[in-house]
Each structure stands twice: as C-alpha cells, then as structure tokens.
Image: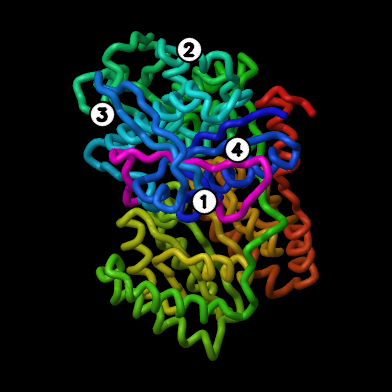
Amino acid sequence: MKHFLFVAAENDALAHCKAGGMGDVVRDVPRQISERGDKVHVVVPAYSRLHKEAFFRTHLNFELRGKTYTAELYEAVPKNEFKNIIHYVIHHPEIEAGSIAHIYHDDPKEPFYTDFLKYTIFCTAVAEAIKKGVFGTLDIVHLHDWHTSMLLFLKTFHPAYELLKSIRFVYSIHNLAIQGIRPFQDNYAALETWFPQVSYEEDMLKDQRYQDCINLMAVGIRLADAVHTVSPSYKEDIMKPSDPPEFIGGEGLELDLKQANKEGRLFGILNGCNYKNIRSAKRRLIYQNIVKAIFIWLQQESKKYKADFLAHTGEKVVAYLDSPPDFICSSVARLTEQKFYFIKRSPEAFIQILEKLDEINGAFLLLGTGAPEYEELFRDLSHKYKNFIFINGQSEDVIDSIYLESNLYFMPSLFEPCGISQMLAMRNGNPCLVHHTGGLKDTVKDGVTGFTFDGESYDDKIHDMVRSFNDAVSVYLTDQPRWKKIKANAKRQRFTWEKSVDEYYKDLYLLQQ
C-alpha cells in the first residue's frame, strides 16, 4: 500500500469547500486511488469555519516571522465516506475565509496579499504535520496550484524540513493565470517577512517580469518532481507565449514550462468526470427550481443589494411555468474574464444570439456570480432582453436542472485548462458550443459531439462564434437525425477518472500498476 497526501485550497469532498474545478479534482482523484488499495490523506485550510464540525487531532507548532505559531489539525467529516481516504482541515485564526466562495480573498490594490499570508501559514503547518508523522510515512505529496507551492520552498530551502526531500512531490496546474506573485522583501506579505532566517536562491523563485518578487506558480513548476496540466492541449498551449486576446498561453512562464518539458517533468493529462453516484435532478422542474432559489436568496441579507434584480428575474421565469421556451441555450460559470471576455468585449455578438433565439421561441439561461463588472453587464442585458434569464446566484438544484434540460450548452472561454462543465453537459447528452482552446479541444469535436468556433484574429473568432451558434440552431431545426446523432455521440463520451489516474500512476507518481 502506498501513502499519498493531497494538499489543496479546495476539496469538494467536504461541504462548502469548493470555488472551481480544482475542488472536483481533489474530491475525485483520491477516490480512484483508494479503489486501487492505496491510502490518501487530503488536507485543506479550515477558513475559520470548516473545523467547527470536525474532530480535533493535534496542535502544530512552527516558526514564522521569528515567532512560534500554533495551528490546529482536525479530521473532517466528508459528504461521502470512502475506504482509505482521510480528510483534514487546518485551523489558525489568520487563515480566514475570503469573499470568493468563502475561500479566496480579492485584494485589488495589492493582489495576493491576504492569500499569501494564509497559505503561507497553511503550508508551513502542513510541512510540520508531515515532519511530525501525522500522515504516517508518505510516498507522494500531490500539490494543487500556487496556494500549496510554498511546501516546495520549504522542502528545498528550510533546514527544519529536510525530511520532505525524501518524498516525491507532484504539482498540478489548474489555472496558470493566477500565480501568487509577492515581493521578496519590504512588505508584510513578503517572503523575507515570514522566513527571515531561511537562506534561498532568488533565481529559483523569482518572477522573470518582476524580479523583486517571488512567483509561487513558477516555484511549483521549477521545484516539483513532476508538473501536471489538466489537459494535453493546455500543456501545448502554455509552452507558447500569450498574445491576448487572440491567444492565452504561458502567461510569462512559457520558458519554465518548456524547461520542465525538456527535463521530462511536464505532463498533460485530461481531467476526468464522474459517471456514477451522480447528484441528479428531476425533469421538467427547471423553472420551479429557479423560482424556489430566488425566494431563498431574497431572504438573505447578503442579497439585499440585488433584490430588485432577483425579483425581475423571477417575474420573467414565472411566465415560463405555463409557456416554456422551445429551445434552451445555457451557461453555468463564474463570471470572469476567462469565461466571458468575448461577451463583455463584443456584447453585440451575444445580442445576435439572443435575437436568433427569440426567432425560434428560445431562451438563454446563464447562472453565475463573480466580477462586479460582469454581473452588471448581464443584469443590464437581462433588463433589455426578455428571453435572457440571468440567474445571479448559486444553487445546486438549478445547476443540475440546467445541465439536464438544456438543448445547447455554451462555453466561450478565452482559455480553458480543462473544463468540467462541457463534460457534465455531454454526460446528459447535450451538445456543447465551445471555443477551440485548451481542454475544450480535447473534449468537444466539431460536428461530431458538439460545435466549436475559432479564428486567426479576435474579429474572426467573434464572427465564427455567431456562425457556429447559427449552424447549431439550423441543425436542430432542419436536421433532427443529425442532431440526435450528435446528442448520442456526446452522451457516449467517457472522460473517466480511471483512465486519467492510470496516467497519473505511470507518469506523475512513477507507480506503474
């Protein structure tokens, strides 16, 4: 039996511990590992809340800022129990919940300031727990995104954590664009403030663009034994320089990634999707579920500022209870530049899509929260177009219903490391319309399992997005046999975690089974 430790900022095996696709991966991969007879420990921050229903296990004492810090390790109760998996959370008063999914902080004036502090404390506590033997003797430590790469700094440079050098460390990149860049010195959220007595080599840590800063995403890429991107095509994309908005690639780290690839440390392995134990919705309840969610949100103090808009949305949805649309196009996503840049920059293209839907008694359903400027854009469009239903909140019941009852799922991501939404839609037999980039290239085949758009220039891409949407609608209206074949092809696709974890064992863990 091999022993693994997964270290991450999110873990959807625990309630209320997910902001994005990373949470799904950290939930699902340990389950596959456990089915192979190996043991997995999974640890995430408690964010001043997750420890309250957990069981205290031990105190962890360690040095930071020249002082002794004491954190608390708890064993958490997962949503579902699986043999050979133990979940933990680490609590310290300074590991606080942020405004994004009660996990991440958004510090617009000084990016990563607060998150650097809390993830530094978290990572040092994890290093101490490993040293203390809390997780037993470990064979593999699997880190996820920049929030956990401080463990590689500790492994490489901190004399108190020499023990970590005997363990294989794997680093997964979920979103290369978010890099955790902070100053080396002269700031409270700086490396030397927190590790004043640790000697290190700046060249191994620094950001090539801001050379007075540590880049924690780069640290993960440079210092891990294996580096993993969550799709094969994204691996190829990020070894090329970015040329926004036409192409989002290595985001300044393409040389580090090319070096890791040259050294045989960089692997592109597609994320999987669950095909069993699925949380499912009942058919023909989508509008009831939306109305129910709106009534719940209207009672929440945090939603008071958008109460008028929620009521406006509810009024539009009620009309669909008696006279539902004939065609539903949908999206479920965080409202960010990555997901909806094309719509924000070219709202006229999205309006063409809405007008086409109106011609066929169709509606566009978008569920999401996120950046204020994107929420404002979609609220404004919702007021102007009666067939655009913007559900400005989060509801599992509504999300399940959208995946179940949509005719076409729309995913115009500017870039996409892997994407899970298209897999969930295809699992229900719903064709997707996606930008031909990253993991979307690896999962949706134009005219076979869905529809794609692309182009050499930004204008080409926008033109092709509208063309592809019109083509999809045309197939639906005029060629039902072909539409049904595309639906059947989509539903037959199997992006299984079993296959992905086979590759993990072979390439990342070096544990060929």
Q: Residue furthest left?
A: 186
Position of the N terminus by quadrant = top right
State the residue at coordinates (60%, 20%).
Answer: 168
Compare marks 2 and 4 and give the one earlier in the sequence.
2
- Secondary element under disc 2, as helix, strand or loop, is helix
Residue pointed to by mark 2: 162
Q: In the rendered structure, find residue 14 and report the number of the disc placed on it.
A: 1
Kindly indicate the quadrant of the structure image that contains residue 379. bottom left
Identify the magenta region. 78-99
Residue nearest the observer in this picture, 301 or 447: 301
Of callouts 1 and 4, the N-terminal one: 1
Counting from the top left corner in percent of width and height, residue 381 is at 37, 69
Q: Amino acid at mark 1?
A: Leu
Compared with residue 291, is residue 216 higher up or lower down, i.e. above or below?
A: above
Label 3 and label 2: CA atoms lie apart by 25 Å
**Which residue is pictured at 50% across the width and 47% down the height?**
76
Structural crowding at the residue carrying mark 4, measured as other residues with C-alpha within 10 Å and reported as few (<14), some (14–19) or many (≥20): many
Report which residue position mark 4 lands on. 230
